[in-house]
Amino acid sequence: MKLRRISTKFVLAVLAAVIVPFCGFAVFVDQTVAKRSLEVVKQALVGLATDLAREVDREIEHRRGEIALWTADPRTHEAIVEARSDRERTTWGVAETRAVAAGRRPGGPDRNHRREQTLAFDRYVENSRVYDLLLLVDADGRLVSVNCRGPDGAPLPELQLDRLFAWDFGAEGWFDQVVRSGEALVDHHRSERLGLRIPDDPSDLPRTYHIGIARAIHDVPGGEFAGALLGLVNWKTFDDLLRAPLVKDYFRGMVPEDVVPSPYAWIWGADADTILAHQDPRLIEERVSGELVNLPQMVADARSGTPGEAGLFREYTFHGVRKNAAFKQCAAGTSGFGWFVGVGINNEDIFAVTEELTALLYKGTAGVLLACVLWVLVIARRTTKPILALQTHTRRVAEGDLSARIEIGSRDELGELADAFNAMTRDLSENREALIKAEKDAAWREMARQIAHDIKNPLTPMKLSLDLLRRARAERRGDLEEILDRTLALMDRQVDNLREIATDFYEFTGGRKPVPQRLDTRTQVDEVLELHGAWAQERGVSIHIEGESRVVWADPGKLRRVLTNLVSNALQAMDEGGRLLVRIELPDESRVRIEILDTGAGLSPEARERLFEPFFTTKGEGTGLGLAISKRVVEEMGGDIELEPRADAPGTVARLDLPTPPEVARPMP
Ligand code: ADP
Ligand code: MG
């Protein structure tokens, strides 16, 4: 579990290390770059609007120049003069104009000027492709001559000519103005009355609109007003200006290659409200503040701009799209109409680069992150694997398996750690072997020393007795018989003693396995006490037995040895006489308890602690094996043994618990 947490920590660290800076950068890009882009685009919009307005101004300037040239041409004046003098006799009209168009020469010498004027107008209309009509009007406002063909070279329809020749131009506003000031500009207007039909294709709609440029003609410069020339410039000329590729090309680099940039330009009238030109022809003549467009704040923005300077509209929404736009007013007064040229762009385009960049950043972040996480997982795996191995091996070592070795290929710190671990376990196992060997050696030495000591003890009195006997025989002493008896008795005792010691050692090394059987405790206890009777008497110790007899499940020989040792220990503890009590009890159904109580010296704290240690003895002749063997034997038989100070009197109580036979224990009959 913990190890998995290491890799989690790694991953979290990497996430923090990658995500935080990348996201910070992305936000920075979003904020700063987007703001910059917007600023740059706004400037570009202003520049573009200014350029377009200048183009419009130039176009109008150019056309005014052309009309001025026409009016300055003496032939134009002569045509008027010819018409003036002709009016009393014949008329120049539809038929004549049609005849010219048909390539014929209408009869009469007095008609040359008007005919030539018509032909000159034709050529100009056809070549310039800007004018639809060039109308020469006399001082009364009547048509003198007009081009007989349209810009496409087709003859003007008879109906149209009819209407024009019947028209009273003198009643028109521009005519008055020309009479007064010599020049007039007719703002954007529908030209249906001139017979231009509304086209089927809406994109041709601008063709049905015109602006008019008019100029006075005088008999002599500064003299009598003779008439006027009116040129109708097709609105298409200005419409085309707005559709110049320049507008889109300006922003080409901002959007992806396969996308057409959104910017487009438009022209509003001098009221900053009427739409004169727009990429959507349906909006022509509509009001910006009107219901259809409904952007009154743009009108307000345009009107509140500094005159002569370009300005920016506030960001707005048109047809559900957020946009930014700039405007510039064209020349006003005598030299222009004071229109407003506007250029707008969708916000989407402005932020396309930013969005592309941000998307790229996020994709990059995701990619880098994925790579990092995978890499970290690999590293974490590689790190935790040896740690896991170390963990399992440490556990094995803790459980005592010193043969555990870790195989780690890596040459890093973990590899070193594994090497150190292996060295440690190797040392440990070597040390342990050495220790065991040393312990074994010590144990055997101690054993040998004990055996030697225990055997030597009885040998000395035997040797002494034999020497005494030999001397008595050599000296032929009278008490030889008596000495011989004593020596034999001593020999007997010491041989018994030696056998006892040998048996002890044999038992200590393991002896034979106990073979339990049903035994009567009382019989066993009686046998042992009887054996010790003489000795007890010698020591002045009285022997007592309490309790009923019970049946135990034990090996008779082994139980006898245990009881013998406990009784002789008790007797040995009572140097100055005393009382030995053996008590048989049944603490519960499964156990029989034999207690041997003495009134002896008692147990020292050290003796209490070390009673059952082999070779622990406080006696000069003791082997210290008695209790050690007893404990093992009793436990082998499924019983328990303990010694403690008596609670009721000075002395010691030895408590021996033995199991009852597998069947229920019953008092012997
Ligand atoms: P040994 O009898 O050869 O000394 P044991 O194993 O039988 O060896 O006893 C160990 C020691 O325990 C004795 O030397 C003695 O100090 C102590 N001990 C045993 N029984 C008694 C007892 N009943 N009273 C006092 N000390 C005892
Ligand atoms: Mg003993």
Image (cartoon, rainbow, N blue to C red):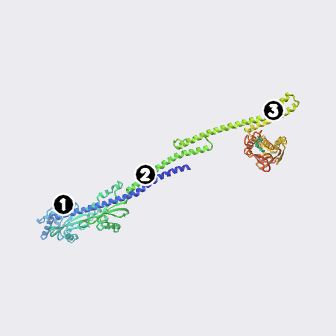
| Left or right of residue 557: residue 286 | left
Q: Classify 10 Å Cα crowding around label 1: few (below 14), some (14-19), many (20 and above).
A: some
- In this view of the protein, can residue 388 be seen by the observer? yes
Q: Nearer the N terminus, badge 1 or badge 3?
A: 1
Q: Which mark is residue 369?
A: none
Crowding at label 2, few (<14), some or many (≥20) Cα neighbours within 10 Å? Answer: few
- Mark 2 vs 3, N-terminal side: 2
Do we see residue 350 in this rendering?
A: no
Q: Amino acid at mark 3?
A: Leu
Find residue 283 and report its horizontal and vertical position in percent.
32, 65
Q: What residue would you read off at disc 1?
A: 123
Q: Quadrant of residue 632?
A: top right
Distance between the alpha carbons at the discs numbered 2 and 3: 107 Å
Residue 137 appears in which quarter of the rendering?
Answer: bottom left
- Depth check, mark 1 against mark 2: the one in front is 2
- The residue that disc 3 covers is 464
Rendered location of residue 612, percent (x, y): 73, 43
Q: Single out the residue that lies furthest toward the left.
A: 109
Q: Amino acid at mark 1?
A: Arg
- The residue sitting at 55% across, 42% down in the picture is 418
Question: How far separated are the C-alphas under marks 1 and 2?
Answer: 65 Å
- Element type at marker 3? helix
Mark 1 or 3, closer to the camera: 3
Q: Are marks 2 and 3 in contact (CB under 8 Å)?
A: no
In the foreground, 439 or 456: 456
> On residue 364, which mark appears?
2
